[in-house]
Image (cartoon, grey):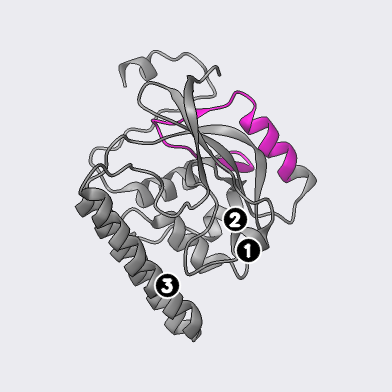
């Protein structure tokens, strides 16, 4: 925080909360404070490509029908070494083809119209560590999502994950799915979601017997690389 306070750029405003109220609350607060036409987010431990905002704004201006835009991501470790890549599908139909599994739209890479975020706030209280997936599941029928195929964000993956945290997140996501699918009478999605929950939890337990890599919970398209290299952005 000391380094942030030393910034002299008049375009930057630093908002400090007095207590931890959770990510969803703070994201809704940030949207409310935003002054621009577009709202972008990322996590504090990730690294943004210098051209990310420019590329995303340009795409949104040319494609006003898109409500929410993400991008492909490199994955990095604690030493800023590139370990892989998350290849995200470009079209809405591809992003949302398996709602029972999850949506291929990396949360730290999101950008969209500020007005849209205000009309569609994050759920509060939020489900444990899956507030982004809850929002996508709730809105994918009425909204239009897209991804840029280029990697404009470096997504940091922790080397180890706690089994309890993984299972707690799996349960939270399954509860969100169950409520939505039952309300919409999507029985097939409900059954597939339950089977996916059981399968993923079983895999988490097996991995915990060795080392659990903290990869994004909803990504089955993480391509690892054999020889990690240092990020050059």
- Say which quarter of the image contains residue 20: top left
Task: Tell me what residue is drawn at x 52 percent, y 68 percent.
Answer: 99
Q: Residue furthest right?
A: 62
Task: Tell me what residue is drawn at x 69 percent, y 38 percent.
Answer: 57
Q: Position of residue 139 (x, y in %)?
A: 55, 66
Is 50 magenta? The answer is yes
Q: Quadrant of the C terminus?
A: top right
Q: Quadrant of the N terminus?
A: top left
Is 26 magenta? The answer is no
Q: Position of residue 220 (x, y in %)?
A: 48, 53
Task: Tell me what residue is drawn at x 27 percent, y 50 percent.
Answer: 207
Task: Tell me what residue is drawn at x 47 percent, y 64 percent.
Answer: 101
Could you say whether the residue bearing mark 3 is in a helix, strand or loop? helix
Is residue 124 visible from the viewing direction of this image?
A: yes
Residue wearing tag 2: 116
Between 98 and 42, the residue placed more toward the observer is 98
Question: What is the magenta range?
Answer: 36-60
Is residue 127 visible from the viewing direction of this image?
A: no
Between 214 and 44, the residue placed more toward the observer is 214
Label ID, residue 143: 1
Label ID, residue 205: none
The 10 Å Cα crowd at callout 1, few under 14, some 14 to 19, many 20 or more, is: some
Could you say whether the residue bearing mark 1 is in a helix, strand or loop? loop
């Amino acid at each position: 925080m000391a380094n942030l306070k030393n910034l002299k750029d008049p375009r930057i405003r630093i908002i400090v909360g007095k207590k931890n109220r959770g990510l969803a609350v703070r994201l809704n607060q940030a949207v409310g404070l935003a002054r621009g036409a577009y709202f972008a987010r990322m996590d504090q431990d990730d690294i943004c490509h210098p051209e990310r905002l420019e590329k995303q704004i340009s795409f949104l201006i040319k494609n006003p029908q898109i409500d929410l835009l993400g991008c492909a991501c490199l994955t990095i470790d604690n030493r800023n070494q590139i370990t892989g890549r998350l290849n995200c599908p470009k079209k809405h139909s591809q992003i949302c083809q398996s709602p029972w599994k999850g949506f291929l739209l990396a949360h730290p890479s999101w950008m969209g119209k500020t007005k849209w975020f205000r009309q569609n706030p994050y759920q509060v209280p939020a489900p444990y560590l899956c507030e982004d997936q809850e929002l996508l599941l709730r809105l994918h029928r009425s909204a239009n999502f897209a991804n840029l195929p280029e990697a404009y964000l470096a997504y940091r993956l922790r080397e180890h994950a706690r089994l309890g945290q993984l299972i707690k997140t799996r349960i939270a996501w399954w509860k969100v799915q169950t409520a939505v699918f039952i309300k919409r009478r999507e029985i097939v999605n409900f059954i597939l979601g339950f089977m996916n929950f059981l399968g993923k939890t079983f895999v988490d337990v097996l991995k915990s017997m060795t080392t659990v890599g903290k990869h994004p919970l909803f990504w089955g398209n993480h391509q690892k690389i054999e020889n990690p290299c240092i990020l050059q952005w």
